[in-house]
Amino acid sequence: MIGIGLIGAGDMALGHCRALLQAGHERALVAVADINEQRAAALQSTARIRLAAHTDYRDLLARADIDAVFIATPNHLHREHACAAFAAGKHVFLEKPMALTLTECDAILAAAAEADRVLQIGLVYRYSPLFREMERLIRSGRIGVPVMAWCHEFRVPFPVGRDREWRYSQALSGGALVEKSCHHFDLFQWLLDAVPVRVHAIGGQTAVRRDGAVKPGVPTEPYELGPGAVNDIIDHAWVNVEYDNATKGNLGLSLFTAGRSMPVGVLGTGGWIEACVPRKLLRVHDGRAGCIEELEPLRKAHEPADVGHTGGTRQVKAFLEAIEAGATPFADGQVGRASILAGLAAELSIRRQRVVEVDELELAAAAPVMAAASG
Ligand SMILES: NC(=O)c1ccc[n+]([C@@H]2O[C@H](COP(=O)([O-])OP(=O)(O)OC[C@H]3O[C@@H](n4cnc5c(N)ncnc54)[C@H](O)[C@@H]3O)[C@@H](O)[C@H]2O)c1
């Protein structure tokens, strides 16, 4: 049996814990580490499980009864926690975004290779039957040749309270287009089978402001940052991405909007397909039938619903299966690294007010390597 530890005991760790319990791995769960003892205690009582609790993650990593860890800490800690876990010989499930920079991603990839352990990134939609069916239909030619993809995530503000304000800090989260939109840029890259080459983005901070001058109109989600918390992230953006195979992506993000779903679509030369995540259905218009067909792939799956996002339980099962089989996960480290490219470029594009070539980021990441090679 694979012994499992949780590093970070916040909202996402609770989701992984519930997914592991749903998948029947209760006995495999051994320990949790969080600097905040209350959150570790709350996770155990909410999930109704007893675990050994550590306040220093290094004590958890030193345990011989743990083979694999789920890292769900704030983004700026991902590199440190993942590299330490590999140095301790553990397999790693690392939450998205993989890290804040390409250089940090490369350090994690090198540590995983050196340790020869499994690395899976929490790009949960890759394990969703909804998006897998969407990808299958696109590959089958149902909408012709894919040309453009879109996603409009018009959502409520990020959660606050219980020390969750780190998402509002550009330095700790990487900004909204890295922290949140890496999921959707990853979907574009997967569905279009493409690599981003050029990004133009516009955006700013209008409603979800540090001074609270304009409160977002979302009654269910109070927005009040704790004392000393920073809010220097954008709260709305349009991002246009050009890919290496001439396809294009458009992402819209808002952090001050309630009551909207998150449509993700692809337009092809012979029709279009759009996923409606809350209703777990795909709408297809292939031009031939001339009408919209609604498909429900989850009905066909005949399995209990995933915990959390669609794909939540399946991604956890897939990680454990990859360890047992010695296989490379579908959402591996390279996929994780690629998933932050467009978001990094978009954050830069907004701040510099210009088009950003993805190669600029790659060259900057390679600079220390090139300097070492020439020295
Ligand atoms: N895949 C998804 O859909 C999804 C959804 C939500 C969050 N996430 C990701 O999961 C990660 C965690 O997000 P969250 O919502 O659970 O945040 P959170 O703020 O609820 O939890 C983070 C936890 O990490 C703990 N922590 C901070 N520093 C630590 C340290 N040095 N050692 C141990 N624990 C430490 C905090 O005390 C807190 O309990 C982030 O990377 C986030 O982007 C992914």
Image (tube, helix red, strand yellow):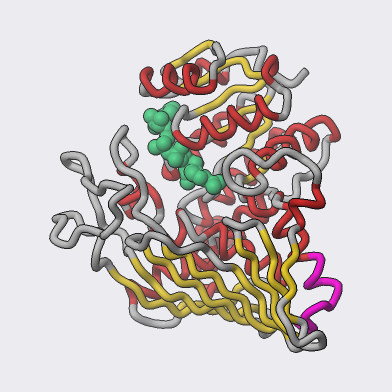
User: Which stretch did the figure color magenta?
Assistant: 136-146
On the rendered image, what quadrant is the N terminus found in? top right
Q: Quadrant of residue 119?
A: top right
User: Please, is residue 93 above or below residue 240 in the view?
Assistant: above
Res 301 seen here: yes
Query: Front-most of 301 and 153?
Result: 301
Give percent across and percent down for residue 235. Answer: 32, 63
Whether residue 251 sits left or right of residue 87 in the image: it is left
- Picture residue at 65% right of the left edge, 22% below the top: 4
Q: Residue at 22% across / 45% down in the picture?
A: 225
Q: Is residue 153 left or right of residue 139?
A: left
To which quarter of the image does residue 263 belong?
Answer: bottom right
Q: Residue at x 14, y 55 (%)?
A: 211
Q: Nearer the viewer, residue 211 or 275?
A: 275
The correct choice, above or below, for 56 with respect to 217 in the image is above
218 magenta-colored: no
Q: Residue 337, position in %: x, y? A: 60, 55
Number of numbered callouts drawn: 0
| Quadrant of image for the C terminus | bottom right
Q: Is residue 77 visible?
A: no
Left or right of 31, for residue 303: right
Residue 307 image offset from top left, x and y in percent:
61, 38
Magenta-span inclusion, residue 138? yes
The quadrant in which residue 302 appears is top right
Query: Where does ligand 1 appear, by image quarter?
Result: top left
Residue in the foreground of this view, choosing between 322 and 57: 322
- Measured from the top left, where is residue 205 in percent x and y? 26, 66
**What residue is at 78 percent from the left and 72 percent from the top?**
138
